[in-house]
């Protein structure tokens, strides 16, 4: 007992937990005593430290139960319990030399076989490479007896389950910002071949600085390389609800946030299962409930609901959800993974565009700063004082108006400007206006980021950008042909002005055929030119449209020009996009990348 007590007090001193100078000096003298120290002296000192609050309640309980040896692991001194899970415990601790606060997770092994420890350490090594702002960093790892432990950065904040339970559903702008942060962390993990498999509110932690961190990224399914060079899959998933675990390897994750394919076989998952879990989490953040959980539902009923029931709509619960975000949730929670976002990158693009549209709402951003509640009596005093002050100001103002009424001059409105200057039209970055779940008319595999749009290759593809084109505009484009040759189509679709311009159709004589649309079933403005899209080289185009004129220019060369009544024209066969008012872009067989797409509503002479 004395050796354990001495070791514990040494660590307390090293960690800087003893904040009383007299106690530090007394402890130092005891530790340096050449004759040793009686047990009674240790007891007296530790009791004084406990009474003065220099020992935590957790450390006092361990002391009283005779479990001092469990208060340290290596150079880390445990100070408190953070969480209890089905696979182990999470403690707050401090590095005794660096004085850095950390979180230490102990994961219990099913057996003492060296294979379990080897697998755990291999996954911890992979976790240490996941250095991203939105992923809790792994700092250290090891074994203590038959328990593995992982040392992680400590985040001073609440997980999203706690936040919703304590504060209620989140404002939409806040939930959107947190979803975007989580998606960025998942994007990085998926690039490193790591699939979390247990994305849920409990595993998303928000610090006092508003930064979201994903927990347990190291204890997931990941693609590794075996000693013989072949690829193999290994797993060590976390489960925080043991009653939902049938047996190890059969059901891994949390049912309320688990993708249908993961419930069938946890080994047959990819990053799209994490996006499904994130979609369920977002639903929880906005409604306070998991999407498929109802009172009285059994475990099997919830599994079946994820697989068969329609995706619930957020608009049925809240009225402040944009329609675009409904489309995002529907895609994240699609039953078949082929119908979900193909990657976190694609999801991030849609979330960023929506956030730019609605703004971040800084006043509502998550900033968890604990503060003691004010006494109710103090609040009443402040409220009464504010009310009396407001009444006094009103009386003084009213009396002043009565005194000045006789001499007051009549109030005259200032004259309106006779010739207000017209405001210049605003240019529009169309890449920021595109919403793939809404705007794709044909072709699977469109890819969109903040800086480029990529059409899918080897198939017909059409995209309708849902804006109302101004009467006169210039559309600037920078286009790169990324595949074999094929046509590129740019068009307008609105009542009285429905046409397209087609460029880049290869001909036998090495020229290209351009066309505008159809009149009475025949093509209009078929003309030959020497223009072709060179592969992998950017081409700058200008698409000029007025009320009766259209032309396309490349640098100083005019590729197409037409003037007349647009009502006579129709969109050619195969290029229709329905009745939606829009600008549209299409291609057939060829894949084009657009890195600049600006609309300038101006007058064209």
Image: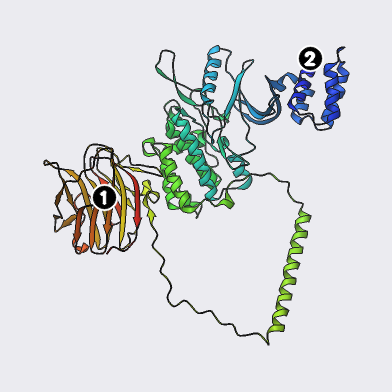
Label 2: which residue? 3
Residue 204 appears in the picture as rendered: yes
Which x, y percent locates residue 585?
Answer: 28, 49
Image coordinates of residue 16 in percent, x first then y, are 75, 28
- Label 2: how many Cα within 10 Å (few below 14, some 14–19, many 20+): few
**What colour-coding does the image apply?**
rainbow
Q: Compared with residue 599, is residue 344 higher up or lower down, i.e. above or below?
A: above
The quadrant holding residue 409 is bottom right
Can residue 310 be seen in the rendering of this structure? Answer: no
Circle 1 or circle 2, nearest the eye: 1
Residue lying at the far left of the rendered structure: 509
Residue 376: % across, % down = 76, 54
Question: 161 left or right of 446?
Answer: right
Q: Nearer the viewer, residue 498 or 527?
A: 527
Q: Which residue corresponds to the image point at 39% horizontal and 35% vertical from the top-left? A: 337
**Residue tagged by mark 1?**
555
Q: Position of residue 393 (x, y in %)?
A: 73, 71
């Amino acid at each position: 007992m004395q050796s354990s007590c001495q070791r514990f007090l040494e660590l307390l001193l090293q960690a800087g937990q003893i904040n009383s100078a007299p106690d530090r000096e007394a402890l130092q003298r005891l530790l340096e005593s050449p004759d040793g120290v009686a047990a009674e002296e240790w007891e007296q000192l530790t009791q004084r430290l406990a009474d003065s609050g220099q020992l935590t309640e957790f450390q006092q309980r361990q002391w009283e139960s005779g479990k001092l040896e469990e208060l340290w692991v290596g150079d880390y001194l445990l100070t408190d319990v953070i969480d209890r899970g089905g696979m182990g415990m999470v403690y707050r601790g401090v590095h005794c030399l660096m004085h850095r606060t950390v979180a230490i997770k102990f994961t219990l092994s099913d057996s003492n076989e060296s294979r379990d420890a080897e697998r755990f350490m291999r996954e911890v090594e992979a976790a240490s490479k996941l250095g991203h702002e939105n992923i809790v960093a792994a700092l250290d790892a090891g074994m203590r007896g038959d328990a593995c432990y992982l040392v992680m950065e400590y985040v001073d904040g609440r997980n999203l389950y706690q936040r919703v339970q304590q504060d209620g559903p989140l404002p939409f702008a806040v939930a959107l910002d947190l979803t975007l942060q989580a998606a960025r962390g998942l994007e990085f993990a998926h690039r490193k071949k790591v699939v979390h498999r247990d994305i849920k509110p409990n595993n998303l932690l928000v610090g006092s600085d508003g930064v979201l961190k994903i927990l347990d990224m190291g204890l997931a399914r990941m693609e590794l390389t075996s000693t013989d060079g072949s690829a193999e899959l290994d797993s060590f998933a976390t489960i925080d609800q043991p009653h939902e675990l049938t047996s190890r390897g059969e059901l891994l994750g949390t049912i309320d946030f688990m993708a249908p394919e993961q419930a069938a076989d946890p080994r047959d998952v990819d990053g799209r299962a994490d996006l499904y879990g994130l979609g369920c989490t977002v639903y929880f953040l906005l409604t306070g409930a998991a999407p498929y959980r109802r009172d009285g539902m059994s475990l099997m009923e919830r599994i079946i609901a994820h697989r068969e029931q329609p995706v619930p709509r957020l608009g049925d619960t809240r009225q402040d959800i944009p329609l675009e975000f409904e489309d995002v949730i529907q895609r994240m929670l699609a039953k078949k993974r082929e119908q979900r976002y193909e990657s976190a990158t694609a999801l991030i693009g849609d979330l960023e565009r929506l956030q730019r549209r609605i703004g971040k709402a800084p006043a509502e951003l998550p900033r968890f700063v604990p503060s003691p509640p004010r006494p109710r009596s103090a609040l009443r005093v402040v409220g009464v004082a504010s009310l009396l002050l407001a009444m006094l100001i009103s009386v003084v103002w009213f009396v002043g108006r009565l005194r000045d009424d006789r001499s007051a001059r009549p109030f005259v409105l200032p004259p309106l400007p006779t010739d207000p200057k017209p405001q210049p039209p605003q240019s529009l970055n169309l890449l920021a206006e595109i919403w793939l779940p809404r705007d794709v008319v044909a072709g699977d595999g469109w890819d969109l980021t903040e800086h480029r749009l990529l059409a899918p290759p080897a198939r017909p593809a059409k995209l309708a950008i849902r804006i109302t084109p101004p009467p006169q505009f210039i559309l600037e484009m920078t286009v790169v042909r990324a595949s074999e040759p094929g046509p590129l189509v740019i068009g307008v679709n609105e009542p009285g002005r429905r046409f397209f311009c087609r460029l880049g159709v290869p001909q036998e004589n090495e020229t290209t055929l351009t066309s505008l649309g159809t009149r009475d079933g025949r093509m209009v403005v078929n003309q030959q030119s020497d223009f072709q899209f060179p592969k992998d080289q950017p081409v700058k185009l200008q698409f000029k449209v007025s009320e009766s004129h259209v032309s396309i220019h490349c640098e100083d060369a005019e590729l197409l020009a037409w003037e007349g009544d647009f009502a006579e024209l129709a969109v050619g066969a195969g290029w229709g996009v329905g009745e939606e008012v829009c600008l549209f872009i299409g291609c057939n067989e060829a894949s084009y990348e657009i890195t600049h797409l600006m609309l300038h509503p101006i007058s064209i002479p």
